[in-house]
Image: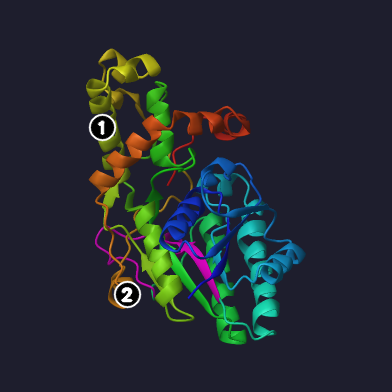
Amino acid sequence: MMRSILVTGGAGFIGSNFVAHWAATRPADRITVLDLLTYAGNRANLDGLDAELVVGDIRDEGLVASLLSDRGIDTIVHFAAESHVDRSILGPDAFIETNVIGTHALLKVARREWLEKKKPHRFHHVSTDEVYGTLGPNDPAFREDTPYAPNSPYSASKAASDHLVRAYHHTYGLDVTTSNCSNNYGPFHFPEKLIPLFIINALHGRALPIYGDGMQVRDWLHVEDHCRGIAAVIESGRPGQTYNIGGGAELPNLTVIDTLCAAMDKAFATDPSLGSRFPDAPAARGLPTAALKTFVTDRPGHDRRYAIDCSKAMAELGYAPTHSFESGFAATLAWYLANEHWWRGILDGSYLDWVRENYADRQAAQ
């Protein structure tokens, strides 16, 4: 069936990749993006895509109601969120405002516009594996029925939003689905997170700050696989259900960083032009990128291990990741090397000033 979808946070990393995926696979559908264009939102992420961008706040119930009514929206795909753990530790208020109050505002409008007017609909909520807390080395991976145990203001705010979405289904009958994903990476990843931050730092000869011993384990999910998983949930997921979406690549941060360093060295050795483009990179002088590794004090409440069991999505939706970490990371590094104009446009703006002001050497993500 044809859909008219509203993608909140659609100018951000995962949201814009989802818009690209949906537009390519369902060209007849109408896509409206609602994004406040805070520091992590970028108009350029939507360049060339058949989607209308509306700049606005998900907490603006009047705006959301007019979008649902005027554009005949029947599907909301809710990405909009504050998502960086370090920033949630420094300033949790914004996370409560966007992730909890913002989600509740969307749900209230959806209830009025869809349920009270008896319109077919779906509200898909995008969440994170961090709501489940942390795992020990030998614990089984997170399942959809794993009890919630969030350990940071960010994950607590996402857990609260998950519960609100569930409640609107069970109390009011809103047709909702939720997906909890593992660590995403890929094109358009904002450079406050580990992989893009370390790529850019390495190109500039800056330190690669590693929290604690660097042995925190994450399940790495290429954003294209995540988008395919979300699309499958929207189209085939059962109302009221949650589906975990993972990448099947459970790796310590240190392994990811070592992979990045080795790939950077190889890229410079293969392409001599990189040395002239990035003369401050150790690899431009034949030195190992790994020399930039710097161990820093661990962040408060740092979860030790995440792992996703996505067998439910596999069994019910036919989901399976198609990218290995090796192939997905190689493609990601190639994208950042080929799209210098994109990340320089970000670093030349207000974000870099914000980083310097707030946590200079504590930039490593998750």
Q: Residue at x 45, y 64 (%)?
A: 26
Q: Residue at x 60, y 86 (%)?
A: 171
Disc 2 residue crowd, few under 14, some 14–19, many 20+, Cα 10 Å: some
As rendered, which of 162 and 330 lies closer to the eye?
A: 330
| Percent position of residue 334, x then y | 33, 35
As rendered, which of 242 and 340 lies closer to the eye?
A: 340
Q: CA distance from mark 2 to mark 1?
A: 34 Å
Q: Which mark is residue 263?
A: 1
Q: Amino acid at mark 1?
A: Ala
Name the residue at the front extreme: 28
Coloring basis for residues: rainbow
**Number of dots carrying numbers:** 2
Up the image or down, 155 lies above or below 72; here it is above
| Percent position of residue 195, x then y | 38, 40
As rendered, which of 149 and 9 lies closer to the eye?
A: 9
Q: Amino acid at mark 2?
A: Lys
Q: Quadrant of residue 161?
A: bottom right
- Left or right: residue 52 versus residue 321 is right
Asked if the magenta segment contains residue 91, the reply would be no
Q: Is residue 162 visible?
A: yes
Residue for badge 2: 312
For marks 2 and 1 on the same chain, the one whose residue lies earlier in the sequence = 1
Q: Which mark is residue 333?
A: none
Up the image or down, 339 lies above or below 271; here it is below
Q: Which residues are magenta?
A: 122-144
| Percent position of residue 38, x then y | 64, 45
- Left or right: residue 159 versus residue 36 is left
SS label for mark 1:
helix
